[in-house]
Amino acid sequence: MSQEKTLTLRQQIEKMAGDGEELKPLDFENLILDDIQINELTADDAAYLETFSTLGKLCLNHTGLKNLNNLPAKIPIFKLELSDNKISGDELSKLAIYEKLTVLKIYNNKIETLDQVKSLAVLKDLVQLDLSENPVCKVEDYRKKVYELLPELQILDGHDRDDQSFFSDEYGEEGEDDLDDMVLKNLDPETKKKFKNGEIGIDELREMGLTEDDLSDYDEEGEFEMEEGGESEKDEGANKKQKT
C-alpha cells in the first residue's frame, strides 16, 4: 500500500477553500490554521503566508510546531496564537519580528524560564499574554515577575494585574475577545485601519492622547478556519473582509 503524500501548507490551505473556489489571500484579515499538521514552517510556507498581506491575526494552535523558524515576517500581525505545540522558550526571541503584536497566546508549550519570557520585552505593544500550562508557571512569584519583566502587559493567563478574571462581567460577555476594548476605542476609521494594518501601534495611539480607557473593539473579519478533522467551513459573509 503506497503512503499518502503529505500536503504542503499551501495545499492544505487551498484545500480548505473547497473545490472550484478561488482563494484570494488579500480577502483575509484572520487566518486560523488550528489542528492541521505542520510541525515546522519552511521558507516556502513563509513566502506563501506573506501573500496574505492584510493579515492581522494568525492562529497555529495544535499544529505540532517545534520551533518558530520561517514565520511570515512581512505581514502586520497583531494577534498570534501558538498554543498546544512543542515550542521551547528559546524560540520566543524570534517573535521580535512582530513589532505591533498586542496579543500572544502560547499556552501549553515548553517555556521554562523567566529569562526566556524576558525576550518578549521588545514587544512594546504586547498587552495580553497567555503562558498557562508552561513549566515557567511553576516559578515562585511567577505572575509578579512576569509583570515586572513586561511592564506594558495588562492581561496574563486570563487575569489582569489585580488578578481580576478577564472572563468576568467586568470585561463583558465576550471575555477575551474584548481585549480590543483595551487597545482600540473611539478611533476614526482611518486611524483604526492604520492600527489594524500595523502602520501604527499603541505608543502612537498614546501620543494622540488615547489611553487604554479610551480604546474599544472592532469587528474581527476575514477569518479562515479549518475545523478539527480537516473539514473546512467557509462563510462568505463573515469570513471575508467587508467591501466598502
Image (tube, grey):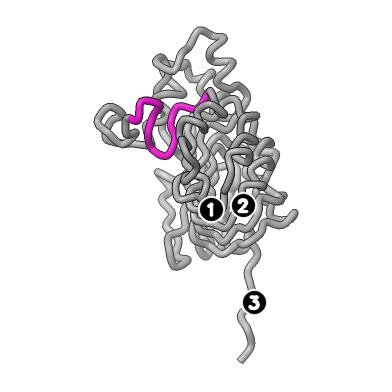
Q: Nearer the viewer, residue 218 or 63?
A: 63
Residue in view at x 63 percent, y 24 percent = 199
Residue highlighted by disc 1: 109
Residue highlighted by disc 3: 5
- Who comes first in sequence, dot 1 or dot 3? 3
- Label pair 1/3, CB-CB below 8 angstroms: no
- Label pair 1/2, CB-CB below 8 angstroms: yes
- The span picked out in magenta is 152-163
Q: Is residue 128 left or right of residue 75?
A: left
Identify whether 29 is placed above or below 17.
above
Residue in view at x 46 percent, y 30 percent = 144
Residue highlighted by disc 2: 88
Q: CA distance from mark 1 to mark 3?
A: 28 Å
Looking at the rendered structure, the kind of residue marked 3 is Lys
Q: Nearer the viewer, residue 183 or 93?
A: 93
Q: Can I make out residue 111 in this image?
A: yes
- Label pair 2/3, CB-CB below 8 angstroms: no
Residue 178 coordinates in the image, percent (x, y): 37, 31
Residue 36 badge: none
Q: CA distance from mark 2 to mark 3?
A: 29 Å
